[in-house]
Amino acid sequence: MDLVRSHPTFVVLGDSAAFGTGDEIGKGKFRGWAGFIADAFQEGCDYFNFSRPGAKSSEVLQVQLPKALRQNPDICAVIVGGNDMLRNGFDPILLYNNLRNCCQQLLAMGSEIIMVELHDPNQLLKLPKLMRRVLNRRVNAVNAVYRKVALEFEIVTIKTRAISNVHDLRNWHIDRMHPGPAGHFMLARNIADQLRKRGWAISLPYQLSVPYRSRAEKIKWMLRNGTPWFLKRSVDLLPAALILMAFEFCKVILEKINPGRKAGELAFLSQIEADPAKIKLLKAS
């Protein structure tokens, strides 16, 4: 395909994965995969990143999206769902509604949309078995939402777990929750490849310099940043995690009694399909 679409307005919405957490190139300055992409357009681009670490899908829709629409983006990345998933009361239907609403407004302006599915955190974190089941169930739910929205619209969606060696620890930040520089670079190459296929004049990012961090520096970072984050999140997440593990234990027992229950893990998708309001929206799209 001829590459003819040049110098776009490129806007990024979402959470820490969109913000560039894990790829700090200066004090308080983050590059991330979006920074690599912004630098790869052959005739440059106008780049705006409105993402915020900790953001959930409701914030993206209500706070970040209006800022993006004012820029009339040619390309807009919408990367969110990880924080929704980690909170008590996670509602995949709310995530779906927020993502769909967001994409619908962007597409109405003629924007190309990029979405990135979640990786498999169980490949990186050592967690209790019940917690691994809970996490796996929720990651699958988030990715199912992404795929549902992608099927409704023509959206560039990166299937992260299908990327070769994506879970190699060298591609991940010391916190094992965010991509490191190599991970962001890998993601940028996959996104750039998809944009090239859509006709955008963009080169594949080809150069990466990763500053060496000694073991002492990694420990220092963990004490300064990781420990406060863990303590803060423990207040929010630990009680919920204990409750979720208790529910998961009950599900395990019920699935052994009635194996057919396991097929209903993504039952919320049928709720979306059966909702008359959603059917009306789909017909109007």
Image: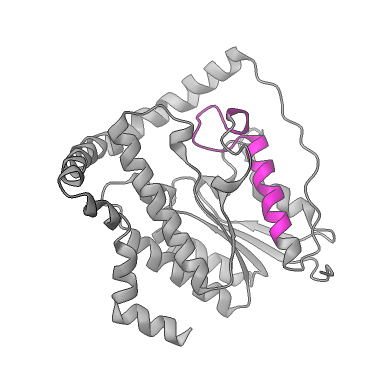
Q: Quadrant of the N terminus?
A: bottom right
Mainly helix, strand or loop, the magenta region? helix
The x and y percentages for residue 125 are 44, 30
Residue 68 within the magenta-colored segment of the rendering: no
Total marks shown come to 0
Compared with 88, 111 (above or below) is: below
In front here: 181 or 265? 265
Q: Which residue is depicted at the point 61% across and 36% down? A: 28
Q: Measured from the top left, where is residue 80 in percent x and y?
A: 47, 54
Q: Quadrant of residue 183?
A: top right
Q: Residue at x 39, y 65 (%)?
A: 96
Which of these two is toward me, 204 or 36? 204
Can residue 31 be seen here? The reply is no
Q: Is residue 145 left or right of residue 103?
A: left
Q: Is residue 268 left or right of residue 215?
A: left
Q: Is residue 129 above or below residue 284?
A: above
Residue 256 horizontal side relative to residue 101, left or right: left
**Where residue 145 appears, x then y in whole percent?**
42, 61
Residue bounds of the magenta highlight: 169-194
Q: Is residue 279 above or below residue 167?
A: below
Pick the front one: 213 or 176: 176
Q: Position of residue 258 (x, y in %)?
A: 17, 50
- Is residue 247 among what the camera can see? yes
Q: How is the image coloured?
A: one colour
